[in-house]
Amino acid sequence: MNACESRAQALFATHFGATPMVVASAPGRVNLIGDHVDYAGGIALPAALAMRTAVAISLRSDGARNLTSEQDAPQWHRYCEGVADLLGVGGFDLAVASDLPIGAGLASSAALEVATLRALLAATNASIDVLEGALLCQRAEHEYAGTPCGLMDQIIAMVDPTACALAIDFAMLSWSPIEIPSRAEFLVFDTGVRHRLVEGAYAERRASVERATKITGVEHLSHCAADRVENALLDAVDRQRARHVVHESARAARAVDALRNEDLATFGDLMFESHASLRDAFEVSIEEADALVHWLMHTPSVYGARITGGGFGGCVVALIERGARDGVVALVQAQFKRRFHRDALLIASVP
């Protein structure tokens, strides 16, 4: 049992006065490249984090549902109850513990969904395959939490890989592990700005991508030729969004090859290009993330950096030479402190 699972078990015992039937957990993720392409049939390269969300649960025969969490996140119970409803599970007592900051772009909602799914499956002696489980959790987020998310976060949480990234093709719904070179390390910096994807901006971006898909007449916008996007009868905003999707998926495919070939310089350049596209074409970056990426671009031993996740807040991921962490962190944190008068915390690293 990991530390997060132990906390969930202890919270359950404190709150419900009993030992739970089952404790299960799932990881958060950092997306190395390929954002806002999972719902457009593109390619993304996420990696699981050591930071996890854990769920302790016991079934009830009276149909009642009692939920508690060590974090006070808005409407968090909807994710758990959505998964339970879709599984056809009735009553339960449930306690949640998490290492993941809410709204930081590290897939805390998917980790909660998958941890709940795993706990309920174990409690009911049922099983489900990875893709079916990911799709069920995505449906719970759509229907119960109101976020029209793609499938990346649920897949990475279900696969739960160790010390590697996962190259996911969302047109084929297939994936393969990509080893992270021994001389490389990815750092995750938290800007401290929290997003709320259910407040509309994420849904607006997805609707824009769906309009562009329909107008260009392709099955997956990520597969659309760039000149077709430019010649299509799109309004200016939808064209910008479509440009990002087409080029971001292509960047991610090149980045997968670069990581396989241990070409860190190329991978880093693609990260910087990705950030610029998320900032300018998709318009999901924030001032703090832009500043972090700018400073990282001019810091020795840094290959690349970008905002990660859905955007509108959250974290920046940076690719650095292994062994350079202390120097990179010190330089970036000092600059962030001077500019924003608070810390940009290093909260995770991969592997």
Image: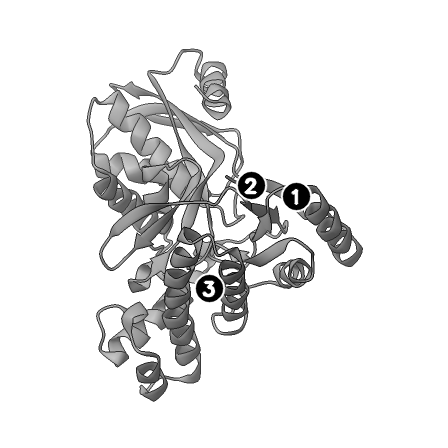
Q: Which residue is mark 2?
A: 349
Residue 14 or 164: which is nearer the viewer?
A: 164
Residue plotted at (19% across, 26% down): 126
Q: Are marks 2 and 1 in contact (CB under 8 Å)?
A: yes
Residue that carries the numbered disc 3 in the rendered image: 201
Q: Is residue 337 left or right of residue 323?
A: right
Which tag, 1 or 3, sits closer to the chain's start?
3
Q: Around disc 1, counting alpha carbons within 10 Å, would you say few (fewer than 14), some (14 to 19), or many (20 or more)?
A: some
Residue type highlighted by circle 2? Ser
Between disc 1 and disc 3, the foreground one is 1
Q: What secondary structure is marked by label 2?
A: strand
Q: Amino acid at mark 1?
A: Arg
Q: Which residue is mark 1?
A: 325
Name the secondary structure under disc 1: helix
Q: Nearer the viewer, residue 341 or 264?
A: 264
Judged left or right of residue 206, residue 337 is: right
